Image: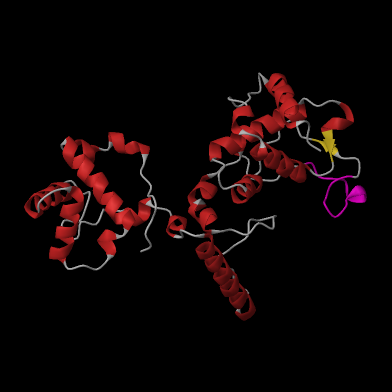
Amino acid sequence: MSKLPWFRTYARMVDDDKLKLLAFEDRWHFVALLCLKGEGLLDKGDAPALLMRKVAVKLGLDVRSLEEVARRLAEVGLIEQATLQPSKWATLQMRSDVDTTAADRKRRQRQRKKDAGSEGEEGGHEQVTGESRVTGTDVTRTDTDIDKEETVNNLKAVGGADRDTSPAAPPSQARTTGKTATGTRLPDDWKLPKSWGEWAIAEHPALTEDEIRRQAAMFADHWHGKAGKDGRKADWGATWRNWIRRATEMPATRRPAMAPTAAAGGKHAGAMAAILGGLQ
């Protein structure tokens, strides 16, 4: 395994029943073992006796004391006693963290593209575990996107909608985009389509599900509060994408602290318009 400059811990550790069973010093011993795992020391293939000596030096213990620490941590299911390996390490770390350089990530992305192209020529089947594209966009999914798979799969449209609720244009006026030349207003019952939320996560991996919901609520309040021709758009999907791009470019200190609600729609819509300078 590649050496990691850092590893992931979780806020719920403070309430973890297994850790609560340990004395305070053993809680630190466990964290220290996580550090050694991230550093790669536990994965060098050393003989068990040599590994114990190396870890004992790192933790400032003698080997006998380390063996007792390992026994106590293993009793509550936090490590494997013989190898000192943390339990469930692979499921609690993100795959993309292992790629420590941009070159690593780029190389893997090129390989996935090559593999996907080969499968397309042979059978036309989508590569399930490699690179894929978010429906309706041209955004290539990277390792970070794959790490967010669970978030994307669990993301539900605001209010439970899972369909594109952009108003459809009459057939006689339809263009290639499916919108009228003069534009339409955002429907009063508009909910964020799941595909739009997936695009936001794929395009801006730093966004959380809650932030996307918050932006969707502000988006609806803003455009429902627009009067006249300024409230009509030919392509609401493109308007959403521009909204998200501008919101992510805005310094965090200038973003509204609270998500808007239907009751405060006008107030938040005005604030968002002032901050973003109006979306086209």
Q: Is residue 275 left or right of residue 75?
A: right
Main secondary structure of the magenta stretch? loop
Q: Is residue 149 left or right of residue 164?
A: left
Q: Residue at x 66, y 39 (%)?
A: 249
Question: Could you tell me residue 268's position as x and y percent?
Answer: 68, 23
Q: Can residue 128 be seen in the rendering of this structure?
A: no
Q: Is residue 241 left or right of residue 171?
A: left
Question: Could you tell me residue 17's position as x and y percent?
Answer: 23, 37
Q: Residue furthest left?
A: 64
Check the picture and name the quadrant holding the C terminus: top right
Q: Residue at x 48, y 53 (%)?
A: 147
Find the magenta span and give its range.
167-180
The answer to whether 158 is drawn above or below residue 138 in the figure is above
Magenta span includes 165 = no
Q: Residue furthest right?
A: 172
> Which one is in front, 224 or 60?
60
